[in-house]
Amino acid sequence: MEKYQKAEKIGEGTFAVVYKGTELATKRLVAIKKIKKNNKNQDGLDVPTIREIRCLKELKHTNIVDLIDVFAHKQNLNIIMELMDSDLEAIIKNKSVVFNAGDVKSWLLMTLRGIYHCHRNFILHRDLKPNNLFIAGDGTLKLGDFGLARDYGSCSKPMTSNVVTIWYRAPELLLGGQYYGPGVDIWAIGCIFAELLLRAPYLASDSNTDLGQLHTIFRALGTPTEEDWPGFSDLPDKKGLEFQMYPRTPLQTLFTAAGNDALDLLESMLVYDPVKRVSAYDALNHCYFRNSPLPTKPEKLPRNIIPVVEPSEKNLKRKAGDDDLNSANPKLARLLFV
């Protein structure tokens, strides 16, 4: 702990307290995540924390959040990570931030580079969404929150289907599939790509159920058949279910401003059959990234602009119970996945 100077608290969650800090030797800003002791676990560690540490120690890449240090101090586990400025969700939602086709291409390119590094090291992220894609001070996008990540060797080993936030969850997971691979991450990236183009979640369901999410997907992309997706009828949660047959709506109908190359890449990510879904490697080699406009350089990408609120008598009054955490930038706390 002598290597770091701890500053203000920037967030607190169920399993951890997060502080802003400085690495004394390099003077760089870091985030210090102090894990709370779990009374149900003699070691004091929850499974997501173990997974996150293990994955980040293995995965060193420009587009993956950097794990700097892990150590015990006064019976607490401390995780030191690079401090990030914001996340992609904040940029998408902030209507004062204007971005163009080159910016979208750059964010997607960095996301695919990060997930390709995961997949070639046989690790599935299993929770990709805009607020798990973090933006560094130099504009670089980095994958974070590896609490649901796990290693895989082949699709013959069963895994839980209860992964990935529901709006970004692949249809094979929604139907209870336990034998899956990198395609679940690619589907999620396809949903993120669509969200960048629309500046709104593409497959957002009003129902917070797997069945409701499936209906949302089928209305948007058409109801699959055995011809489209061999093995579709044999998935655990498909048996006994009959879905309304929706026709496939061409993506051009909704994504009117997107070019043909962008739509071709998006469509290849949102293929129902996981076997036919594009890989991260093939997506990176798609002509979309070579065509004009070229991806924006990270340092020139738009940032999350926090509107300046003019001080007023109402703003200057401090409410009872206000503390530093309430006034801190909540996006700083998101880095450490609390």
Image (spheres, rainbow, N blue to C red):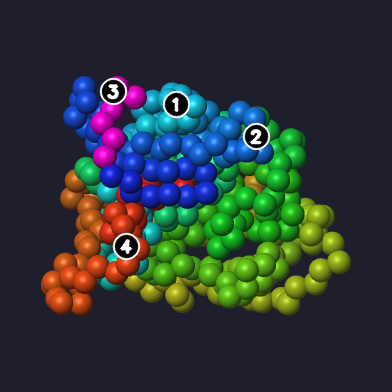
Disc 1, SS? loop
Q: Which mark sits nearer the N-terminus, 2 or 3?
A: 3
Residue position for label 4: 322
The answer to which image quadrant residue 214 occupies is bottom right
Picture coordinates of residue 323, whole percent (x, y): 31, 57
Which three-letter amino acid code belongs to the residue tagged 4? Asp
Q: Which mark sits nearer the N-terminus, 1 or 4?
A: 1
Q: In the image, which disc is placed on residue 41? A: 2
Q: Which mark sits nearer the N-terminus, 1 or 2?
A: 2
Q: Is residue 151 magenta?
A: no
Picture coordinates of residue 39, whole percent (x, y): 62, 38
Which quadrant would the N terminus be assigned to in this image? top left
Crowdedness near tag 2: few (<14), some (14–19) or many (≥20) residues, C-alpha within 10 Å: few
**Left or right: 137 with respect to 147?**
left
Which three-letter amino acid code belongs to the residue tagged 1? Lys
Residue position for label 3: 3
Q: Which mark sits nearer the N-terminus, 3 or 1?
A: 3
Contact (Cβ within 8 Å) of mark 1 with mark 2: no
Towards the viewer: 281 or 24 = 24
Crowdedness near tag 1: few (<14), some (14–19) or many (≥20) residues, C-alpha within 10 Å: few
Stretch of the chain drawn in magenta: 1-7
Q: In the image, which disc is placed on residue 74? A: 1
Q: Which mark sits nearer the N-terminus, 4 or 3?
A: 3
Crowdedness near tag 3: few (<14), some (14–19) or many (≥20) residues, C-alpha within 10 Å: few
Contact (Cβ within 8 Å) of mark 1 with mark 4: no
Question: Residue at (35%, 63%) from the top-left corner?
Answer: 321
Disc 2, SS? loop
**Left or right: 234 with respect to 88?**
right
